[in-house]
Image: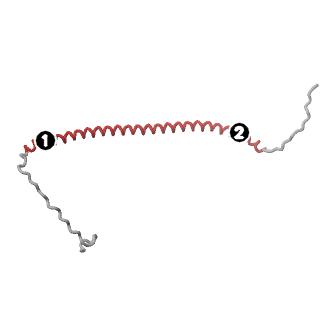
Amino acid sequence: MIAQPLPYEEITLPRTGTRSGRTAGNVRRNRTRTRGYASLVKILGTASVLTLAIVVYLGLMANVTRMNYDLSRTTYQKTRLLDESSRMDDQIARLASRERLARLAARLKMHEPQAFAQVTLPAPRAEALPHGLAFLPWLK
């Protein structure tokens, strides 16, 4: 026995979307082109993010380097000022020494006083308060 196909009803669907059938080729081409650009956009985006990260890192390193130079310059200035201060203290001690002052006094023929005098100054007098107006002092 030979198998025969079963009878069936042919189902006919109403034709809808004929417009999409006409533009299916264009839609497919656009989708393919967009997929090609998507990979390019991903590559460029990744490269941009990496470049931005490198630029930020270099900026931070430049800032740290500048701060290190400022620190070394400040340390050098501090050391120089401490040395200069030490030299000035030594010079003050040398100039204020009793032996030097005694030699200088002897060269200028100075001597100790025979008698000490005590001078008293009179008390300051209280000034009279000005009369008149502040902006017209001549008006009394």
Q: What residue type is labelled 2?
A: Arg
Q: Residue at x 10, y 55 (%)?
A: 118
Label 2 crowd (10 A; few <14 / some 14-19 / many >=20) = few
Q: Is mark 1 on a helix, strand or loop?
A: helix
The quarter of the picture where the N terminus appears is top right
Q: Residue 71: percent from the left, percent from the top?
A: 36, 38
Q: Residue furthest right?
A: 1
Where residue 59 sits, quadrant-wise, is top left
Q: What residue type is labelled 1?
A: Arg
Query: What residue does disc 1 label?
Result: 98
Relative horizontal placement of residue 93, taking residue 22 as reference (left or right): left
Query: What residue does disc 2 label?
Result: 28
Q: Is residue 109 above or below residue 1?
A: below
Q: Residue 92: percent from the left, percent from the top?
A: 19, 42
The type of colouring in the image is secondary structure
Label 1 crowd (10 A; few <14 / some 14-19 / many >=20) = few
